[in-house]
Image (cartoon, helix red, strand yellow):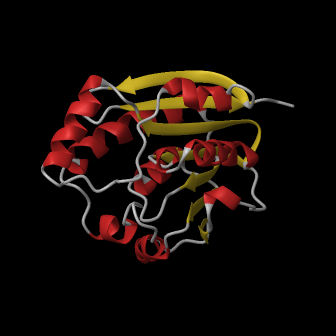
């Protein structure tokens, strides 16, 4: 693990206390968007999905024909494999920055992935969603967004030495949408305030050509 990088092994062993509050709210908004914009029984790819916290909800609501999970953290993938044993789920230990999978999906999503890179890496991570999508498929991406509430909440956590994401960059939507606008049409954008560490959720439909 590089200095200044998030310790994902530690994260998967003991998630922050705040996640117990924020995850259910993000999950509800995410599933609602998924149901609204995706076709039934899609082929799905989850990027950064080691030990996925939304897997059960996605399977219950979307009933995918295939579900691919991509992450470069072997420990987290092993945790997920212990929970999931079904032929329609495929786990890939791979880096989103150099992703080359023979998959064309109806939906590709990530929840809290693209903010863990420098601007160039963030751009690459966003584009990885679209490389795996069929024409007309949807990308669903959530990312922390710098608001006064985010800055205050993170500031308190850092002072208390409880902040465990040293490489997280809170993003403004314009940075993300500046990449997605060449890839497809923005269908939905929502800023989730009540979780304190504010997040933006977007849905983009890939261009037909």
Quadrant where the C terminus sits is top right
- Residue 191, image x, y percentages: 39, 24
Q: Residue at x 56, y 53 (%)?
A: 46
Q: Is residue 178 left or right of residue 33?
A: right
Quadrant where the N terminus sits is bottom left
Q: Residue at x 37, y 42 (%)?
A: 27
- Residue 119, image x, y percentages: 57, 41
Q: Is residue 74 left or right of residue 83?
A: right
Q: Nearer the viewer, residue 15 or 20?
A: 15
Tell me, yes or no, if residue 104 can be seen here: yes
Q: Nearer the viewer, residue 204 or 4?
A: 4
- Residue 117, image x, y percentages: 52, 50
- Residue 76, image x, y percentages: 43, 70
Q: Single out the residue that lies furthest toward the front.
A: 3
Q: Single out the residue that lies furthest toward the right.
A: 209
Q: Nearer the viewer, residue 147 or 41?
A: 147
- How many labels sit on residues? 0
Q: Residue at x 48, y 71 (%)?
A: 77
Which image quadrant is residue 127 in? Answer: top right
Q: Nearer the viewer, residue 136 or 170?
A: 170
- Whether 184 is drawn above or below 98: the answer is above
- Whether 183 is drawn above or below 8: the answer is above
Tell me, yes or no, if residue 194 can be seen here: no
Which image quadrant is residue 120 in? Answer: top right
Q: Residue at x 21, y 32 (%)?
A: 152
């Amino acid at each position: 693990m590089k200095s200044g990088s998030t310790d994902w092994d530690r994260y998967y062993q003991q998630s922050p206390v705040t996640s117990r509050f924020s995850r259910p709210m993000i999950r509800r908004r995410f599933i609602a968007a998924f149901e609204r914009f995706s076709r039934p029984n899609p082929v799905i790819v989850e990027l950064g999905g080691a030990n996925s916290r939304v897997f059960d909800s996605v399977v219950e609501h979307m009933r995918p024909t295939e579900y691919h999970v991509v992450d470069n953290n072997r420990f987290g993938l092993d945790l997920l494999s212990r929970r999931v044993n079904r032929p329609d789920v495929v786990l890939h230990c791979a880096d989103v920055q150099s992703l080359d999978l023979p998959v064309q999906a109806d939906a590709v999503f990530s929840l809290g992935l693209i903010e863990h890179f420098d601007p160039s890496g963030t751009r690459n991570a966003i584009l990885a969603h679209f490389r795996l999508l069929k024409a007309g498929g949807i990308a669903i991406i959530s990312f922390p967004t710098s608001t006064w509430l985010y800055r205050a909440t993170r500031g308190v956590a850092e002072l208390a030495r409880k902040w465990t994401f040293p490489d997280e960059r809170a993003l403004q939507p314009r940075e993300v949408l500046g990449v997605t606008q060449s890839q497809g049409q923005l269908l939905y954008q929502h800023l989730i305030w009540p979780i304190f560490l504010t997040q933006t959720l977007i849905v983009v439909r890939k261009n037909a050509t």
